[in-house]
Image: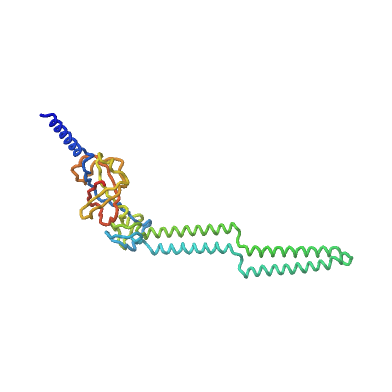
Amino acid sequence: MKPQRAVVFVLAALALGFLAWRLLSPQFQPAQSLSGYIEGESLYLASPVSGSVARVSVRRGDRVAAGAPLFAVEPEQQAAQDDQAAAEYRAALAQADDVRKGQRPAELGVYRAELNAAEAQERETRATLARVQPLVTRGFYPRARLDDAKAAHDAAAAQVTAARQRLEAATLGAREDQVRAADARVAQAQAALRQTSARTATMSPNAPAAGRIEDVFYQTGEYAAANQPIVALIPDNRVFVRFFVPEAQVAKYRPGARVRFACDGCPAGLTAVIAYVSPRPEFTPPVIYSRESRDRLVFLVEARPEGDVTRLNPGLPVDVVPL
């Protein structure tokens, strides 16, 4: 064999070997399709108090929008409590407003009349003192007469001061500590109103998010115990693609990465964003019938679907590949 032909055979053998290594090496093989299913996490909505179910606004399988009414328990009783709390709050506001005001106009008129009478009495005693003082100085009246006139004038002046202070106090309103007490009663009544409003919201809840009704456990007229679920809701934002990744490939899947998945009857091109990768391995669940991953350690991965999830029924099998 000529040396040139030998070199050609050697190079061809090396090329074939390199090609076989590229094809058989796991890191250069096409991404393996992983088995999984659609998972929906349910919200179990209940009433915090026991009572008769007065209304159920949804049925099993219905789709509801965010804020849609679901059910009501004892609405008349709760409405009465709301009205009572609202009335107490209005009464506390009125009392707080009243203590900041002065007396009524009629009452202020009484105080002004008392002040006018006291001023008139003071003027009369002052005039009497002005007449008596020179006569006592000339000796026509005894000294005791002057002392009596001065005492009467001083008493009249004191009455004027007292009447003027009563009028000023009547226009000021209550003391600061009384105002603070009234404001505290307003805050207490407002807190009670918020409490009853919150209880009404829990006894007659609305859907916290758009989703589908998984189940209805009580019907109209039935008695529901406190904290016993009445409606189960699967929100759209709690629908996941749950699949299992062999431990040799888990490094490729990280939160924030995107994957493509497919399911029977679903539109093509569905994608999801990985939200969770389990930190602990587990053996392949028996519901996963992938022969390639059977009897291997796998890691649970959850991805949030992008786009419309209304056709993704929980429990639907899916095949997942990375993007």
Is residue 131 something one can see in this rendering?
yes
Q: Indicate the quadrant containing the N terminus: top left, top right, bottom left or bottom right.
A: top left
**Image side of residue 188 versus residue 47, left or right:** right
Q: How is the image coloured?
A: rainbow
Q: Between residue 50 and residue 246, name the one nearer to us.
A: 246
Q: Between residue 298 and residue 204, name the one nearer to us.
A: 298
Is residue 52 something one can see in this rendering?
no
**x and y percentages locating residue 99 in the rendered image:** 58, 62
Q: Quadrant of residue 34?
A: top left
**x and y percentages locating residue 151 in the rendered image:** 79, 63
**x and y percentages locating residue 50 in the rendered image:** 36, 58
Residue drawn at x 67%, y 68% as measured from the top left:
112
State how many labels appear.
0
Q: Between residue 285 and residue 195, name the one nearer to us.
A: 285
Residue drawn at x 88%, y 67% as measured from the top left:
140
Residue drawn at x 51%, y 64% as measured from the top left:
91
**x and y percentages locating residue 43 in the rendered image:** 32, 54
Question: Vertical placement of 274 versus 55: above or below?
Answer: above
